[in-house]
Amino acid sequence: MWIQAIGYAGLFVVVFVETGLFFGFFLPGDTLLLTVGILAQRGHFDLEVVVPLLIIAAITGDATGYAIGRRAGPLLFARDDARFFRRRHLERAREFFDRHGGKAIVLARFLAIVRTFAPPAAGAAGMSYGWFTVWNISGGVLWVVSMVGTGYLLGNTIPNLDLVLIAVVLVVSVAPVAWHWWRERARRA
């Protein structure tokens, strides 16, 4: 499995890039963390190493995204779509941030795509770095611990996990996006 092959350093890079850099929105954050938990349960990763490492990656990734948004916010919102940048993703994250305030930083951790764009939106919107840091640390810890922990528990309790894993990963990865889409559609109607 490629996750074992990339090791601890590779896991750090994937989580950092997905949470901190615009082109990381396509990376499998939730799926990766669930799988890491399952692999840790099977002895392929040490929880005492991988959980703090991924928390640091998530927090520093969001802090990097915030810094980008703080410095380049007006330019980002004025920019046209490019190969790895879609203005609508940034606008959606900013709307989410405007609606939910600081807790959006925590909630965004659990929403694919929004996870990547909420920190720059917070920076561009002028959220104080102190408050951002509080929400960022809370969200990073909650996201990593809950996802890796869920994967670990699944690996510990479900026999024949390979088939079940595919279904669970699909549901967990798609559910937040589907829920958001459904709510937006209902709100417009």
Image (cartoon, grey):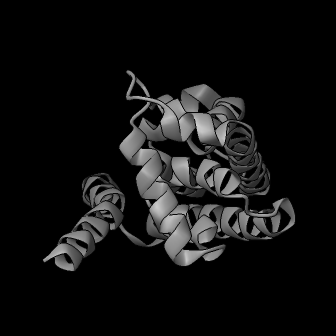
Q: Position of residue 77 (x, y in %)?
A: 51, 41
Q: In the visual, does 119 lie left or right of 163?
A: right
**Which residue is farthest top?**
83
**Which residue is farthest left?**
189
Task: Tell me how many marks there are.
Answer: 0
Q: Nearer the viewer, residue 37 or 87?
A: 87
Q: Position of residue 175 (x, y in %)?
A: 30, 66
Position of residue 81 relative to residue 68, above or below, is above
Q: Position of residue 57 (x, y in %)?
A: 73, 45
Picture quadrant of residue 142: bottom right
Q: In the visual, does 40 lie left or right of 137?
A: left
Residue 151 at least partly seen: no
Residue 46 at least partly seen: yes
Q: Nearer the viewer, residue 27 or 97?
A: 97
Query: At 76% across and 48% down in the image, what residue appears?
Result: 63
Q: Nearer the viewer, residue 85 or 50?
A: 85
Query: At 45% across and 32% down in the image, what residue appears?
Result: 1
Query: At 47% across and 66% down in the image, what residue appears?
Result: 96
Q: Position of residue 3 (x, y in %)?
A: 52, 35
Q: Nearer the viewer, residue 179 or 65?
A: 65
Q: In the visual, does 37 lie left or right of 90?
A: right
Position of residue 47 relative to residue 116, above or below, is below
Picture quadrant of residue 72: top right
Query: At 42% across and 26% down in the image, what residue appears?
Result: 84
- Which quadrant is the C terminus positioned in? bottom left
